[in-house]
């Protein structure tokens, strides 16, 4: 579907918004606006990462926007985000995407109707700002999830489902962090020295805000995983320590039982009336000696 979003407000340039285009529609647009084959091919790749590239007569940009998903285990670029391809020059701006993205209509109706906003570069700035803003809500949600898992790590029992959930949270943060890193070049080009204004600086501020948020989330998730494994290792070491203590208590007893369990006919203690009680007392003395030795070493 092809819409002319700039028809109501712009006289000096065109804004075409194309949703879920066919290959034929993209080809027609490419011929009409003299778009390079390479940028068109990139535009048609659903998993393409953010990029900024100049061609003769126009600039080609890809941004990715967060797309709400119900699947808690979604952790890839395509599962978490949608691609918006942008072709921009002084005479036109073309946005191509597979799924509806409401902020584009909001930008065309509300944010670019003033005199100082009627230029393709400002439209581009607003689109990039909207794309960056789309990561704010998931960032807040991931922060809440991190806080929940921190509580589980420090205050409650740990289990496999906990580790699985924390893994997918870290994967989501990793994906978004990578997309933000690749978006940095786009923001740099928009807010270059010659093009810098209040709108572009606001775009850069939003980028810095999102980058800082996801840097913090990634650090927290990584630390939480490390703490989880350290606590699990400490718990395992504690269990092994207890088992080792028990084995030390039983080792001398096993030795004594082994000696008197041998089937030799001439064993002096076998004929003694107090042999059995004596061995039991010996075992008790060994246990007491081992116990006090452990206490002295502060192993108990």
Image (tube, rainbow, N blue to C red):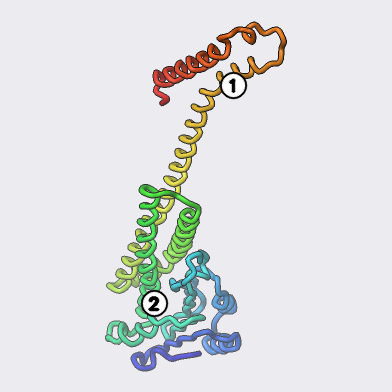
Numbered circle sitting on residue 127: 2
CA neighbours of label 1 inside 10 A, class few (<14), some (14 to 19), many (20+): few
CA neighbours of label 2 inside 10 A, class few (<14), some (14 to 19), many (20+): many
Residue at screen point 45% across, 91% down: 3
Q: Please, is residue 272 above or below residue 189 in the view? A: above
Residue at screen point 41% across, 55% down: 218
Using the rendered image of the protein, determine whether residue 162 is visible from the camera's viewpoint. yes
Residue at screen point 71% across, 12% down: 264
Mark 1 or mark 2, which is nearer the start of the sequence?
Answer: 2
Taking depth in this image into account, of 273 and 5 the one nearest to the observer is: 273
Q: Position of residue 217 (x, y in %)?
A: 38, 57
Taking depth in this image into account, of 115 and 276 the one nearest to the observer is: 276
- For the C terminus, which image quadrant? top left
The residue where tag 1 is placed is 254
Taking depth in this image into account, of 1 and 194 the one nearest to the observer is: 1
Task: Name the mark nearer the viewer: 2 or 1.
Answer: 1
């Amino acid at each position: 579907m092809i819409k002319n979003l700039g028809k109501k407000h712009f006289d000096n340039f065109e804004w075409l918004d194309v949703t879920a285009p066919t290959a034929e529609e993209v080809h027609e647009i490419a011929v009409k606006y003299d778009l390079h084959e390479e940028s068109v091919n990139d535009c048609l790749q659903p998993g393409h990462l953010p990029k900024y590239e100049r061609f003769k007569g126009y600039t080609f940009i890809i941004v990715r926007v967060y797309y709400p998903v119900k699947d808690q285990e979604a952790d890839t670029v395509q599962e978490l985000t949608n691609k918006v391809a942008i072709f921009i020059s002084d005479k036109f701006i073309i946005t191509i995407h597979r799924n509806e993205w409401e902020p584009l209509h909001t930008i065309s109706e509300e944010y670019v109707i003033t005199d100082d906003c009627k230029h393709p570069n400002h439209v581009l700035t607003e689109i990039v700002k909207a794309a960056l803003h789309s990561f704010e809500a998931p960032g807040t949600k991931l922060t809440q999830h991190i806080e929940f898992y921190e509580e589980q790590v420090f205050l409650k029992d740990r289990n496999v489902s906990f580790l699985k959930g924390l893994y997918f949270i870290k994967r989501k943060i990793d994906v978004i962090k990578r997309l933000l890193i690749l978006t940095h070049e786009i923001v740099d080009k928009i807010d270059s020295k010659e093009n810098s204004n209040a709108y572009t600086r606001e775009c850069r501020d939003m980028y810095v805000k999102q980058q800082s948020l996801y840097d913090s989330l990634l650090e927290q998730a990584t630390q939480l995983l490390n703490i989880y494994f350290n606590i699990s290792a400490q718990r395992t070491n504690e269990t092994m320590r207890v088992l080792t203590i028990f084995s030390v208590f039983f080792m001398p007893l096993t030795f004594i039982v082994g000696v008197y369990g041998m089937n030799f006919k001439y064993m002096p203690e076998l004929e003694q009336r107090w042999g059995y009680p004596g061995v039991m007392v010996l075992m008790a003395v060994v246990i007491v000696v081992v116990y006090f030795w452990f206490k002295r070493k502060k192993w108990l």
